[in-house]
């Protein structure tokens, strides 16, 4: 059995469990177990983890109080198991976030990106946009993406193991700040890079920017889905739609990771 957890401290975790179940229904439901995660023990049972949408500051406060922050960081960065963050979950998986409360916000990290929180404005400026997601396959029908006080990925950061970046601009090359150790530089050379999986532009961006000072035909191209190795993040909430295609896509990656890990374990014996 493959066990997939949904972090259940706050936010839309019930909806994720529901869609994960829906995603495996036609195939072999008995091979999967979906659990809500509130403790380090529950996390330890998981082969993959979803971080739901909700409110990222609250989520990280509760995670800290539940002694989950370090286990979560290990899950993502040491064990490197598949993790998917939606909206607030994407914020937690970023190495850096803008517009956090004074004094900052504890992040889990794992994605070498900086996110801009609440990029599209307030709750009342929520919107739905049809997205062409090429990773769902050639000719896939548009995905109904729901954006609620959603973040975007505003820049990709140079890879820095264990360091939370603050003032780093857009970089395509790896720079080594003085704090960076030799090991981290070596890591940076081998680190998987951030792939942009989806952007919001064209008609969808026009819906998103209505009422704001952006001319309708301006090419916006906000980055709204990224992947870096085992870590996947989306600005929007597939759990709030009935559409389980992204869940199904991600579960295939969890399955592949489990098969690979079992193989490595067997070779090591
Ligand atoms: N704006 C929220 C945050 O900063 C995220 C919103 C959401 O998950 N729908 O955490």
Image (cartoon, rainbow, N blue to C red):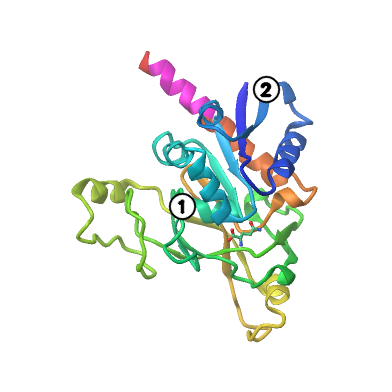
How far across and how far down the image is residue 94, in percent?
47, 55
Q: Outermost residue toward the top?
A: 269
How far across and how far down the image is residue 202, in percent?
67, 74
SS class of the residue under badge 2? Answer: helix
User: Which segment is the magenta one?
Assistant: 258-267
**Magenta stretch, overall SS:** helix
- 10 Å crowding of disc 2: few (<14), some (14-19), many (20+): few
- Rendering quarter of residue 103: bottom left
Q: Is residue 226 in view?
A: no
- Does 261 lie within the magenta span? yes
Residue occupied by mark 1 = 107
Position above or below: 130 against 193: below
- Of the two numbered discs 2 and 1 on the same chain, state the one appearing first in sequence: 2
Q: Are marks 2 and 1 in contact (CB under 8 Å)?
A: no
Position above or below: 67 against 162: above
Cβ of disc 1 within 8 Å of ligand 1?
no
How far across and how far down the image is residue 226, in percent?
53, 55
Q: Quadrant of the N terminus?
A: top right
Count up the numbered dots: 2
Which of the pair 60/247 is nearer the observer?
60
Q: Quadrant of the C terminus?
A: top left
Horizontal placement of 191 versus 254: left or right?
Answer: left
Q: Residue at x 69, y 73 (%)?
A: 208
Residue occupied by mark 2 = 31
Instruction: Please identify, in this view, whether the residue under mark 2 or under mark 1 is nearer the observer.
Output: 1
Q: Residue at x 41, y 41 (%)?
A: 77
Which of the pair 100/136 is nearer the observer?
100
Position above or below: 121 against 190: below
SS class of the residue under badge 1? Answer: loop
- Does 119 lie within the magenta span? no
């Amino acid at each position: 059995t493959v066990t997939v957890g949904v972090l259940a401290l706050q936010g839309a975790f019930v909806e994720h469990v529901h869609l994960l179940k829906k995603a495996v229904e036609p195939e072999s439901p008995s091979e999967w177990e979906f659990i809500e995660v509130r403790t380090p023990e529950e996390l330890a049972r998981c082969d993959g983890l979803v971080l739901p949408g909700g409110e990222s500051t609250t989520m990280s406060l509760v995670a800290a109080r539940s002694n989950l922050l370090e286990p979560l960081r290990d899950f993502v960065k040491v064990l490197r198991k598949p993790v998917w963050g939606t909206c607030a979950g994407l914020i937690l998986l970023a190495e850096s976030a803008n517009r956090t409360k004074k004094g900052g916000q504890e992040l889990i990290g794992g994605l070498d990106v900086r996110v801009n929180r609440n990029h599209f404005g307030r709750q009342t400026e929520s919107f739905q946009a049809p997205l062409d997601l090429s990773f769902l396959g050639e000719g896939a029908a548009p995905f109904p993406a729901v954006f609620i006080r959603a973040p975007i990925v505003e820049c990709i950061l140079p890879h820095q193991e264990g360091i939370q970046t603050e003032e780093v601009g857009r970089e395509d090359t790896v720079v080594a700040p003085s704090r960076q150790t030799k090991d981290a530089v070596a890591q940076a050379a081998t680190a998987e890079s951030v792939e942009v999986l989806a952007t919001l532009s064209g008609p969808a961006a026009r819906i998103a920017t209505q009422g704001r000072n952006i001319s309708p035909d301006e090419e916006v191209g906000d980055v709204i889905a990224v992947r870096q190795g085992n870590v996947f993040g989306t600005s929007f909430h597939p759990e709030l739609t009935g559409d389980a295609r992204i869940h199904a896509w991600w579960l295939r990656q969890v399955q592949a990771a489990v098969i690979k890990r079992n193989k490595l374990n067997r070779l090591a014996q």
